[in-house]
Image (cartoon, rainbow, N blue to C red):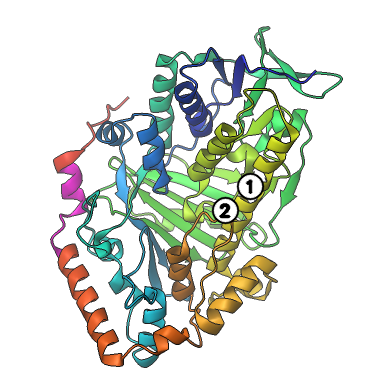
Amino acid sequence: MIPQHIEHIVIVGGGTAGWMAAASLSHFLRHQPTRITLVEAPNVPTVGVGEATLPGIRNFNAELGIDEVDFIRKTQASFKLGIRFRDWLRPGSDFFHPFADYGVPLSGVPFDQCFIRARQSDPALQLADYSLPTLLAHEERFAQPSPEPEHPLLDYKYAFHFDALLYAAYLRDYAVERGVRHLRDTVGQVQLNPDSGYIEQLDLNSGATVEGELFIDCTGFRGVLIEDALNTGYEDWSHWLPVDAAWAVGSEVDKDPTPYTVSTAREAGWTWRIPLQHRCGNGYVFSSQYCDADTAQETLLECIDGKPLAEPRLLRFTTGMRKRFWHRNCIALGLASGFLEPLESTSIALIQTGLSKLLMFYPEHGFNNADIAEANRLARLEMERIRDFLILHYQPSQREGAFWQDRRNMALPDTLRHKVDLFRQRGHLVSLEMESFQLASWLSIFYGMGIEPAHCGLRAGELPSDQLQASLTNMRTALASAAAKAPRHGDFIQRHCAAPALSAA
């Protein structure tokens, strides 16, 4: 039997995905009689080394009515202006991907076309000089942008680094206060309706049972509901993104956190550095085809700044996605829906967008195949767009070594090849349906990875050279002046949102 009304939503799995789902649904269904239960297995090991996010996390928190300063203090958060990529094009290279556009249009011509035209005559011009958050990051400064900036050059977004365990606990308290029932138990058996194949009941190891009409799978890579019970299937993308393991460890900090994530290319992948107020998250994402686990662990421990706070933990995964994130009356969120390496901090953003698709097609009048098909179509497009964006960080690299040489030689997805070809020819930036990263982000990675256009557009080519150079100089000067006035990132935190010291326990 296919349920016609949603009286009870059952979330399986806690962590960031489970508690984001519980918090979001308890808020948006607050005027409905719908009950929500979250079943969380006790004693599940967690990494807890910090999480980097995209600016959309601010919208998620704001929609729930969460006070930003309270959130920052209780999750030991620092601010994030973007990601610094070290050694990706070649050893010694360095570029920044900010959460902002570059420059402003000139005489109706988009800035990127103006920059292409100017750089052809002056190769010393740097894209970074036309982005305020990039300049702030270089000086380790931070200031919140004005809600109504005086000039478009001063408009930018920011995100956070925070302790994922503390954030999950924060949302748990939020959800439980709003009536979410929290069970610490483990799913032993999933009961399906023999006619429809829909999930009807969970048999828990304690002997309790939980019935429901809508089930949300937040059980991580295993996918207890979406895969073990419903056999949805998984699409493997490791031929494009072959990293399949990661060591992760937290470390002590002895300096102020930087307002950005650091990603450094390594022999068989890349390392991350995510600075929080109370510690730093570190990891090495690598391909076991090109590097054994022991060597990868040694590499990670050699490159972290402070003393490790625990033994590193090894995670294994396969990049790709479930063939459907919504199957029958089950929706998979987080790692249960698929995995794209955390190179651009998309994990939490994908939880958010998964929830937004659920709310967009919420089955208040029963489950509809057309709704489910459209939600799955949009989810697939979103994952494919992010996949292409991540591949762009690898394929143009000039680094030596088997891992990087194989990335250069791999065939690109048609959608990415089309984008690269258009940009190489005339600097045209393509935006497709369900893009998670806007045109300025693609511009950042194109230039950062050494891909430059052969030509600019006709309108940019007709701009008077003296007018173009003067306008670009004025932009650089204004942005440099604005960046110099901002406080140091550490000072800003201490002044406005420093977290209380954590107890030794």
Identity of the residue drawn at 39% across and 40% down? 59
Q: Position of residue 397 (x, y in %)?
A: 54, 74
344 over 477 or under it: above or below: above
| Residue bearing the label numbered 1 | 378
Name the dominant secondary structure of the magenta segment.
helix
| Residue bearing the label numbered 2 | 434
Please state which amino acid type lies under the numbered disc 1: Leu
Q: Residue furthest front?
A: 108
Q: Position of residue 40 (x, y in %)?
A: 56, 21
Magenta residues span: 484-494
Identity of the residue drawn at 39% across and 22% down? 174
- Structural distance between the alpha carbons of marks 1 and 2: 7 Å
502 over 400 or under it: above or below: above
Identity of the residue drawn at 31% across and 40% down? 77
Which corner quadrant of the image does residue 126 belong to? bottom left
Q: Quadrant of the C terminus?
A: top left
Judging from the image, what secondary structure is the residue with disc 1 in?
Answer: helix
Which corner quadrant of the image does residue 401 belong to? bottom right
Judging from the image, what secondary structure is the residue with disc 2 in?
Answer: loop
Return the disc, 1 or 2, that comes first in the chain's sequence.
1
Foreground of the two, 271 or 462? 462
Is 272 included in the stretch rendered in magenta? no
Identity of the residue drawn at 77% across and 30% down? 230
Q: Residue furthest right?
A: 195
